[in-house]
Amino acid sequence: MTTLMEIKDLKVGPDNNQINSILDNISFQVKQGETLAVVGESGCGKSMTALSIMGLLPQNIKLSSGSIIFDGKDLTSFTTKKMNQIRGKDMAMIFQEPLTSLNPSFTIGNQIAEVFKYHTNYNAAEIKKRSIEVLQKVKIPDPEEKLKAYPHELSGGMRQRVMIAMALACNPKILIADEPTTALDVTIQAQILDLILELQKDFNMSVVMITHDLGVVAETCQRAIVMYAGQIVEEGKVEDIFEQPLHPYTRGLMLSAPRLGSPKEKLHVIDGMVPDRENMPKGCRFNPRCEFATDKCFESEPKLEEIQEGRRVRCWNKLL
């Protein structure tokens, strides 16, 4: 598979603070047509990674170093105008909560039309026709009537389908899905995930799936990146990571996942919380919560080391 996007040494943090970064030297690749999972607890930097790629960082946060090579071009050198030209066309993103992502004051039709008005030369009739077509693609019934509806008139699952339709309106090369099923019930979650994968095949699109749900990863992704406290701590094929997690944090996540048919016993818990950015522990950032930590873990920070092709881990005591 060819590489569509390569993130190199990405460092992101507050404008006035170069020491306590939110993202610390993040590097990974996204292959053409693959589904890559980005996994970790809340506060690990998953969503900030997505916002960095899309050029949608909050005003008080900036990208201080690194590069984002997309389709051969470094997005970090793009002006806002140039980013606007590819955002929504070549790159698209589905956000966590569709109700807050959609504008309550405008109809679904108006909001889908905005994508076509900005990125194409379609006239009004063509825009309406294409809008109906994209709603049909995401399996929304009675699409012509739904164009007249407001977001609050649709269910959570339907709103998420609308968000997917808007994201895929211009056939993007890469789709970033940030917890796309968080606010939905289990049945609708499965439908949305199936829909994303089906459309991915239709468009030969790359997908970056940001999630804390290991079930979603197992069902939908080929490779996974595990993040902790703004760093990548493990990367590899999904089957390899599930079969033999090498980082204690990854192992803890695996053990914390409930399993059908398992004996009635307490779930494994990773003690403690993700450290505050202003108060990172010395050495390995996971050492206060790690049952395998040794003196070395408290003294110096391990590097992200490639132990075999496509398999990387950041740990002094790899669980080999």
Image (tube, rainbow, N blue to C red):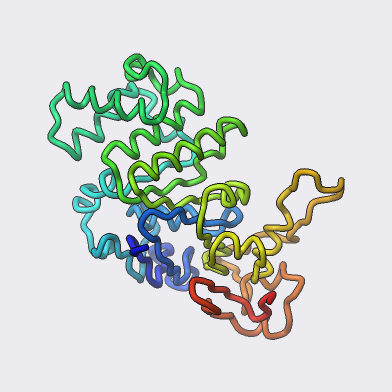
Quadrant location of the C terminus in the rendered image: bottom right
Question: Which residue is pictured at 35% across the width and 70% down the height?
Answer: 66
- Position in image of residue 210 (x %, y %): 50, 51
Question: Which residue is pictured at 57% across the width and 69% down the height?
Answer: 233
Q: Nearer the viewer, residue 189 or 222?
A: 222
Question: Which residue is pictured at 72% across the width and 61% down the height?
Answer: 272
Total marks drawn?
Answer: 0
Q: Nearer the viewer, residue 12 or 232?
A: 232
Q: Nearer the viewer, residue 221 or 232?
A: 221
- Position in image of residue 142 (x %, y %): 38, 16
Left or right of 37 on screen, residue 243: right
Question: Which residue is pictured at 12% across the width and 35% down the height?
Answer: 121
Quadrant location of the N terminus in the rendered image: bottom left
Left or right of 39 on screen, residue 166: left
Is 300 above or below relative to 226? below
- Position in image of residue 236 (x %, y %): 54, 66
- Position in image of residue 302 (x %, y %): 58, 80
Res. 187 image quadrant: top right
Left or right of 187 on screen, residue 151: left
Is 213 above or below relative to 279? above
